[in-house]
Image: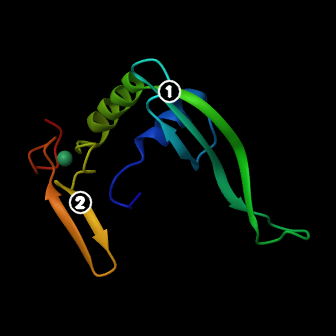
Amino acid sequence: MNQQEIDWYSLTAIKVYNLPEGWQYKVIDKTKGPAGYIWLEGYVSTTYKRGEKKGQPRRTSKQGLWIKQADIQQYQKEWETLTGKCSQCNGTGKLLQAISPDEEAYKECTACNATGKPQ
Ligand SMILES: [Zn+2]
């Protein structure tokens, strides 16, 4: 996951299941459920604020759940209406194709024809 593209899976899960902000999926399985459903497992990653484990990673709201492809699409549409940006490229008109230590390669976003605006 890079900073440019939006994690729609996690955002949809947060919205549909009323999860705390910052919840992020770590496991994704598009094959095991019925058609149109995606299985996610994730958690909110924080650190212990005090005590013996202070500073160590802490995982809360650990949960596995199903989200519907249709819910993601609906959420993307709402977001596009609200922001006026293409949901696939976050309004930049390009998508990160590959990343290596010394270069980032981009390709034009086909969802918005590289305009950055919802079509
Ligand atoms: Zn786009």
Residue 2 spot, x, y in % from top left: 38, 61
Given the current orientation, which residue lies at the most extreme right position? Answer: 52
Where is residue 106? Give x, y as percent: 18, 63
Q: Count residues near mark 1 (Cα–Cα under 10 Å), then give few for <14, some for 14-19, many for 20+.
A: few
Above or below, comparing residue 78 to residue 25 in the picture? above
The answer to whether 72 appears left or right of 28 in the picture is: left
Q: Which amino acid does label 2 sit on?
A: Gln
Instruction: Look at 24% across and 50% down and name the residue there.
Output: 89
* Circle 2 crowding by C-alpha within 10 Å: few under 14, some 14–19, many from 20: few
Q: Quadrant for residue 14, please give it.
A: top right
User: Which quadrant does the N terminus fall into?
Assistant: bottom left
Disc with the residue nearer the chain's start (2 vs 1): 1
User: Is residue 99 shown above or below 91?
Assistant: below
| Label 2 residue SS | strand
Q: Can residue 87 be seen in this view?
A: yes
Q: Name the residue under label 1.
A: 32
Which residue position is annotated with label 2?
Answer: 97
Query: Is there CB contact under 8 Å for labels 2 and 1?
Result: no
Quarter containing the C terminus: top left
Query: Residue at the spot x=44%, y=32% of the render?
Result: 30
Taking the view exactly as shown, the residue that stands out farthest to the front is: 32
The colour style of the image is: rainbow
Query: In which image quadrant can residue 96 be found?
Result: bottom left
Q: Where is residue 43 in the image (x, y as percent from the top left)?
A: 64, 47
Q: In the image, 43: left or right of 11?
A: right
Q: What amino acid does circle 1 point to?
A: Lys
Q: Measure the alpha-carbon separation of dots 2 and 1.
A: 27 Å
**Residue 79 against residue 25 in the figure, above or below:** above
Q: What element carries label 1?
A: loop
* View extreme (bottom): residue: 102
Residue at image position (15%, 58%) is 107
